[in-house]
Amino acid sequence: MVSCSGPLLVVLAAAAAGHLTDEQTASWVWAACVGSGVTCAVLSWWTRMPVLTAFSTPGAAVLVGSLGDYAYPEAVGAFLVSGLLMALVGLTGVFGKVMRRVPPGIVAAMLAGVLFSFGVGLFSALDGAPVAVLVSLTTYLAVKQRSPRYAVAWALLAAVLVTAVVPGIAASSVDIGLTLPVLTAPEFTGSALVGLALPLAVVTMASQNAPGLAVLAACGYRPDDRLLITATGLASTALAPLGGHAVNLAAITAAISTGEEAHRDPRRRYVAGVACGVFYLLAGVCGAALVGLFTALPPELIAVVAGVALLATFSTSLAQAVADEQGRDAAVVTFLTTASGVTLGGVGSACWGLVLGLVTHLALTARRGRGGRQEQQKTA
């Protein structure tokens, strides 16, 4: 639900900007969901880790402003090249090496910053749906005391039941039926490769794959970055002719599936990834219905579900971010930058939070290093 709601609306906006037909739009949703479903289920089963994947929301946001400047076959060609670029970066292993050198406090702060808007969104929803928020939060806290594993599920059920009583879900707008993908032959032009393929690859790697690896690492897993990024890049390449723009590692849904609520034993949490993959596949088969459903769902319901589901992960990551006193300043810079939601040059706040946090860390480390050497010289 969290994977498809917000990102799907961005994809629909990009499809409208590119003047796509209803069939092309439904095929795009089909490709995005099927690609995410296959990679979710297979990679989680293969690695025995909750490897959650998704279709690139920042990438779709980039397309909202630029897709209309190109013919659809040119865009498909750009999607294909972008997938190949990401697969090649994954094969080299360079991306994973860089991520492993980042201090844990900065990684945790970036995750906390990514989750911050969801926590705030839970209580911002009080304006539009106070009953749903209070009932869901109360249910979550009550069940968490006795059975933490099922607290989120009960909170979701409570929110849905309360929302169903209040008018807001326009069932008549949902078109039930199977979706058939539409094959489009790619065209390769220099302008589309520079204007679409390169920004899409960079934004997806920086704003999605980096936080995705960080979430797994922060929760105690040791992800094989070569396998995961290469696999998602190849999936993106294969689905490009059907409209899929990019498949990548997820951060938000990964945070939901890597906590104790998924399973007390971290070795069994991979089942959440497999289950999410199955639901993705079902959503892809009914892509047209999914478009109507999430267009009709009240946004407050999505905010409540996501906010409640991420409370525990947010508190844990925030605690890890400020645990190291020497690295606290860098972690705070990372958290505030990421939480700000700033976008510069088409790159999202998660990437800029990581960059500014590392700059702060290096600057303070160098300063402490010079101070220590001077003190040693005075003592000598």
Image (cartoon, rainbow, N blue to C red):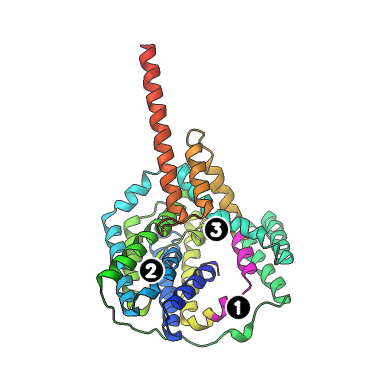
Image quarter where the C terminus lies is: top left
Q: Which residue does the image show at 39% across and 37% down from the upper left?
A: 362
| Mark 1 surroundings: few (<14), some (14-19) or many (≥20) residues within 10 A | some
- Image location (x, y in percent) of residue 65: 43, 69
Q: Is residue 298 magenta?
A: yes
Q: Which residue does the image show at 32% across and 74% down from the upper left?
A: 238
Q: Give the structural element (helix, strand or loop) at label 3.
A: loop
Magenta-colored segment: predominant secondary structure: helix
Q: Amino acid at mark 1?
A: Ala
Question: On the picture, is 76 further left or further right than 155?
Answer: left
- Image location (x, y in percent) of residue 289: 53, 83
Q: Above or below — where is 242 with respect to 162?
A: below
Q: Which of pointers 1 and 2 lies earlier in the amino acid sequence?
A: 2
Image quarter where the N terminus lies is: bottom right
Alpha carbon distance from label 3 to label 2: 29 Å
Label annotation for residue 246: 2
For residue 189, what is the image quadrant?
Answer: bottom left
For residue 207, what is the image quadrant?
Answer: bottom left
357 vs 322, nearest the viewer? 357
> Which residues are the magenta region?
292-307
Query: Which residue, given by chain and number where applicable, does mark 3 sit on?
Result: 263
Q: Which residue does the image show at 29% across and 58% down from the upper left?
A: 89
For residue 184, what is the image quadrant?
Answer: bottom left
